[in-house]
Amino acid sequence: MLIIVVYGTCGTLTFSTSDFTSENVVKINPRYGRVNNPNVALKDDCALRAFTIEMAGYIAPSFWKNKWISLSESAFQMNECNETMYRTYRFSNTRPPFKIKEERKTDACYRSVFVDDETGDDLSKGTFDKPLKTIQAAVSLTRILRILHGSDNTMCIVIRAGTYYLGTNATSSNSQLGAIALTNDDSNLIIQNYQNERVILSGGTLLQLQWSVHARTVTGGTIMKAQIPSYVKPDQFNELYIDGKRAIVAKYPNGDPSTQGLYAANPGFCFEWQKWWGPSSNKSVEIHVQEPNRNGTVFTNYQLGIGGGASVFDPPTNFWSTASPPGGDNYVTTRGITVNRGTLPNINNWTKPTNGWIHTFQGEYWGSWIFEIASVNSTEYTIMFGRGGFQEARGLSWGGAFYVSNIFEELDSPNEWFLDKDTRTLYFMPNETMPKIFVASQIPCLISLHGNNINSPIQNVQIQGMILSETTNTYMREYMVPGGGDWAVHRGGTIYLMNTKDITITHNLFTQLGSNGIAVIDYNDITSIIMNEFVWLADSAIILVGSTNGIDGFSMASQPVNTLIQSNLIHETGIYVKQSSPILIAVSRSVSVIGNLMFNIPRAAININDGFYGNHTLSWNVMFNTVRETSDHGPINTWDRQPFLSDAKQSGIPSLWQHYSYIHHNTIFNNYNALWPIDHDDGSCFYEDSYNFHVYGGKKNFLGHSKTDHHQIYVYSDMNRGDFGSNVCLGFYAPQRGYSGWNEVWIENTCILYKIPMPYIIGNCDTTDLLVPYLANNKIYIPNGTEVIFTCNVNGTSTKLNLKQWQSYGVDISTTVYSTPDVQIIIEWGREMLQMTIV
Ligand SMILES: *[C@@H]1O[C@H](CO)[C@@H](O)[C@H](O)[C@H]1NC(C)=O
Ligand SMILES: *[C@@H]1O[C@H](CO)[C@@H](O)[C@H](O)[C@H]1NC(C)=O
Ligand SMILES: *[C@@H]1O[C@H](CO)[C@@H](O)[C@H](O)[C@H]1NC(C)=O
Ligand SMILES: *[C@@H]1O[C@H](CO)[C@@H](O)[C@H](O)[C@H]1NC(C)=O
Ligand SMILES: *[C@@H]1O[C@H](CO)[C@@H](O)[C@H](O)[C@H]1NC(C)=O
Ligand SMILES: *[C@@H]1O[C@H](CO)[C@@H](O)[C@H](O)[C@H]1NC(C)=O
Ligand SMILES: *[C@@H]1O[C@H](CO)[C@@H](O)[C@H](O)[C@H]1NC(C)=O
Ligand SMILES: *[C@@H]1O[C@H](CO)[C@@H](O)[C@H](O)[C@H]1NC(C)=O
Ligand SMILES: *[C@@H]1O[C@H](CO)[C@@H](O)[C@H](O)[C@H]1NC(C)=O
Ligand SMILES: *[C@@H]1O[C@H](CO)[C@@H](O)[C@H](O)[C@H]1NC(C)=O
């Protein structure tokens, strides 16, 4: 039973989802969310009473196939929402319902090749009784069978229980080329576990170690040491997994990045800086496309900076690298930090500081950076930075909360480790007893699928029933800026897809990973990612990143298209990279994200980084505990600052306008630092948002246009924090005639206020020249005994209007105002809306 409880002075909301699996009892404790800026005082608002799942008691599910249905049903929606219901949901523009792909049956196998790490032999026949030893040998054998029996027959690789250390003696450590590298020769293939057997694909190598005592620390700990075997590649050994869990790279201040962050009472970050060293700016070559443009909007022209400051990215381009990018500043990063005296008490004793990294939040907490340490002046308490800072695209001349890692002298706490690459010595401090299984990461990518090109993709492959784990981290590898969002992204992952068609990834567990979970890069048609769990990832879970030829995404189809991401459980992602998400949609077409459960993440659960093409559907998802470590964001975040040409409006006709996207029937808790449940930020347009249950926040328009909200329920929207953020059911910020705020609709919504009877903030509101959404038929609930307030300029003065006065200007016709009911009634409304089909 998963019980989601939001504690607060305004009442307790309790939701339960059925049968989350009995093994998986998740305890929830109320806890104050930590605000990024320690100078901002916490107010005693219920929105600030964040809740957290106590992961210490979390036990990874021990099942692989049989219980996925019940798991996915709980992810689907509270209680009994079921497929039939959302299939019959009709969109206002009569869009056809989404069709779910049938799961392929194993009896589709023309021939099965068996693999068993323990009893197998790569020279045997690959039968059930005489299995092969390695998966790579099985891939080779299926290629031969295909030549013998015809390439249209589906071959199956069936893997028996065991841990397959794919990192051992791996030849490539490329994050786009897997140890299992599938190509066009491998179309029509199923790779799966045998029945419910536990098959672990590890990106590491098992270490046989002879430990001896190196030293005892003042705090009573023991530092052990051992030589690493000759075949271990030290450069790829940047994560140590002990008994299947990520250990802590020696760091200051102490704390486990997996379970501690800005959300925790003890965050493991330090706030003691005296100064950040200003950046040196480096001019980029600028591209500004004058025609075509999106006249009538805020973000009219395509623009890009190349080289100069953008050279830290690969390719060396960044939307933010023009001198004055629209909606922000030129990309730069800080060059160094001077910490307060007394912070970093061991800094005098660091023998090899340039081994180290500094992890720091970007100063506005829009993401984080990791830098190599270039030099240290310990008398000045100054650390200057080398390579790095490209893990998000906005930049800034100062950082925020930080920690230093990979410094031997900071190895002073249980579960910390350090590798001296020169002497190949591994140091480790056990807690009490020495653990048994030490695995050194060796590769970031386990399985890759590379088709020849768009016209000749690898087709019809299914990957099912695996545990993918223990990979190399990639946060210091090449990052690129996919568009005008805030993101820079590493285009690699544990499973990597490029030039594919009809690929299904299902019933897998992605856990303890150094990189992204699944990277869907450039052209991939009909990718289905269904019923997987992602947990303990360094970066994002699923990234979809396409590409264009500059503004031209019309004559180039190198984008993911028709992707289905359904019924996945995604949590504890972004352990190192804070500008990361369970799901990133960048330069992609027609993505459906349905019935996923996402929580415990540093930033958005779903980020739509740009307005390329559109036609996305985000529905029936449940999101909570998002934006736990960053700021100015929401559980669902969208941007549209950079126009692209595509045929979204009309087939065969290039246009800068995109197709509508649909966000409906989601349950969204706007807790921790989340400011708007659906943060339609800079320029977002063409969204139809409906039937969502939002807790603690309202609708946002900022510099965008053409969005429709209808049949939404907004619960206690006035209980967000401070004067920045939602606070109302409709935040209509800075509309400007001829630029933003046009073609907006807000009708038939339910707005429930807890304390303040003010449903809207309408920027530039003036009754002589009203620029507001089309407002009608809304139900507004205000605290009992208060009067509703609509604020607008009348005769040049800001005036508080009552409903009748407000309606006298021709707006909000048929809108009604009532007293806020008991919270149980509100929950019933939510249940009813989420369970009923509304047509
Ligand atoms: C799913 O919804 C349909 C239509 O409301 C209903 O008849 C059916 O019993 C539901 N199924 C489950 C498993 O709840
Ligand atoms: C890896 O390579 C080493 C050295 O070449 C060799 O001794 C070892 O058997 C190899 N391990 C595997 C699993 O191939
Ligand atoms: C934008 O459109 C308006 C009228 O729709 C027109 O007056 C103006 O010249 C246009 N500007 C550009 C740059 O095309
Ligand atoms: C500026 O860019 C050039 C080439 O792109 C590079 O060689 C140089 O080191 C950069 N300077 C700074 C201060 O980043
Ligand atoms: C740092 O090094 C100095 C001299 O080598 C030593 O006296 C001191 O104890 C060391 N400090 C720590 C915290 O290890
Ligand atoms: C540290 O900075 C001080 C003051 O600028 C300077 O005198 C000293 O030489 C520097 N030390 C190192 C190691 O650069
Ligand atoms: C060390 O052991 C103690 C007692 O068993 C436990 O409370 C603590 O969490 C452990 N620390 C680590 C880092 O494993
Ligand atoms: C929109 O997406 C759906 C799948 O969700 C697809 O069937 C449809 O063809 C897409 N429409 C366009 C215009 O791309
Ligand atoms: C605004 O001005 C008009 C005409 O001068 C007047 O009738 C009306 O009462 C004024 N409204 C307010 C709210 O002051
Ligand atoms: C509002 O207050 C009045 C008077 O105290 C009470 O009769 C009524 O039931 C209250 N309404 C709600 C919805 O709580």
Image (cartoon, grey):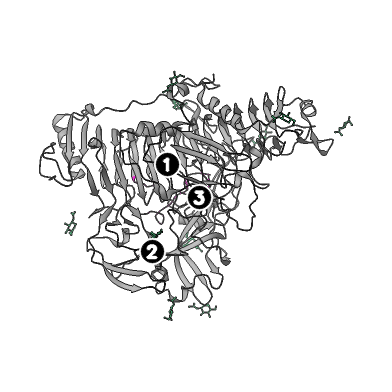
Could you tell me the amino acid type at mark 2?
A: Pro
Which mark is on residue 414? 2
- Quadrant where the N terminus sits is top left
Q: Circle 1: is it few (<14), some (14-19), or many (20+) Cα within 10 Å?
A: many
Please tell me whether mark 2 sits on a helix, a strand or a loop.
Answer: loop
Q: Earlier in the sequence, mark 3 or mark 1?
A: 3
Residue 473 position, x and y percent, is 37, 54
Q: Nearer the viewer, residue 699 or 567?
A: 567
Q: Which residues lie in the magenta part? A: 472-494
The residue depicted at 28 percent of the width and 56 percent of the height is 439
Quadrant position of residue 714: top right
Q: Is the residue 300 above or below the residue 331 in the image?
A: above
Which mark is on residue 318? 3
Examine the rendering and report whether any part of residue 391 can be seen.
Answer: yes
Front: mark 2 or 1: 2
In the rendered image, residue 98 lying in the magenta stretch gets the answer: no
